[in-house]
Image (cartoon, rainbow, N blue to C red):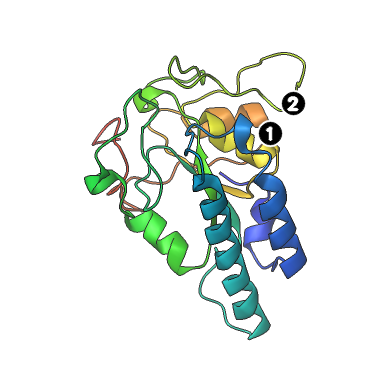
Amino acid sequence: MSKNPGAMAGGKPSKIDMKSRILWAAFRTVAAATIVMGTGCLPVLIGISSAVAQAADAAFAAGVSVGPLQGLPVSIKDLFAADGYPCFAGSSRRLPADPWEQDGPLVATLRRQLGVIMGKTHMVEFAFGGTGQNSHHGAPYNPWDAAAHRSVGGSSSGAGVSLLEGSAVLAFGSDTAGSVRIPACMTGNAGLKVTIGRWSTDGVVPLSLYV
């Protein structure tokens, strides 16, 4: 899911753009985040994100490109296994660290290309639903209306929110029966359901093994 598909084609974010976005987004992730990391964890993660952004800046300055995700602020749905992040898949219990706190193939590619992980995002429990509701972690507000608690769709509910409110310019979600496309539609973003088999689903908590 992307806030600005054209930004993926050839634009290179500047050092000021990346660093300011990271620092500002650190204070804006409540609407999209599912996980309370605990005292002391958030500054550590911000430090890691800043370090990755600086590495991307250095690569740009040297004329080096390690991939199309270089320097992009990216959010990841809370069913992607990622080192340093607990995984709940929207449920009430933290999933086992092995394998759900180890980078899966997609997250590993994101890190290799110096994409900046901004955090994990809200989702419907185990991705089973299209409204964005979650009885354990609550439902994010749709940023289009700050006064009323309107649905953002699901199950990748926080993905759309992170793009609209500016925490990320690209969001990793999952889509079995509309779980990327529905939130994209309801938040005014571009959403893509990737062809089955195009990308590895290893390291992604499955709703279905066949769709």
Instruction: Tell me if 28 is positioned left or right of 77 in this view.
Output: right
Please, is residue 120 above or below residue 107 in the view?
Answer: above
Q: Position of residue 196 (x, y in %)?
A: 33, 45
Q: Position of residue 158 (x, y in %)?
A: 55, 33
Please, is residue 86 above or below residue 57 in the view?
Answer: above
Instruction: Tell me if 83 is positioned left or right of 114 in this view.
Output: left
Q: Which quarter of the image is occupied by the C terminus?
A: top left
| Residue at x-position 69% and y-position 52% | 23
Q: Nearer the viewer, residue 62 or 22?
A: 22
Kindly check if marks 1 and 2 are in contact, taking CB atoms under 8 A apart as contact: yes
Mark toward the viewer: 1 or 2: 2
Q: Position of residue 187 (x, y in %)?
A: 66, 30
Separation of marks 1 and 2 at Cα, in angstroms: 9 Å
Query: Can I make out residue 96 in this image?
Result: yes
Q: Position of residue 84 (x, y in %)?
A: 40, 51
Task: Tell me the SS state at disc 1.
Answer: loop
Q: Which residue is mark 2?
A: 144
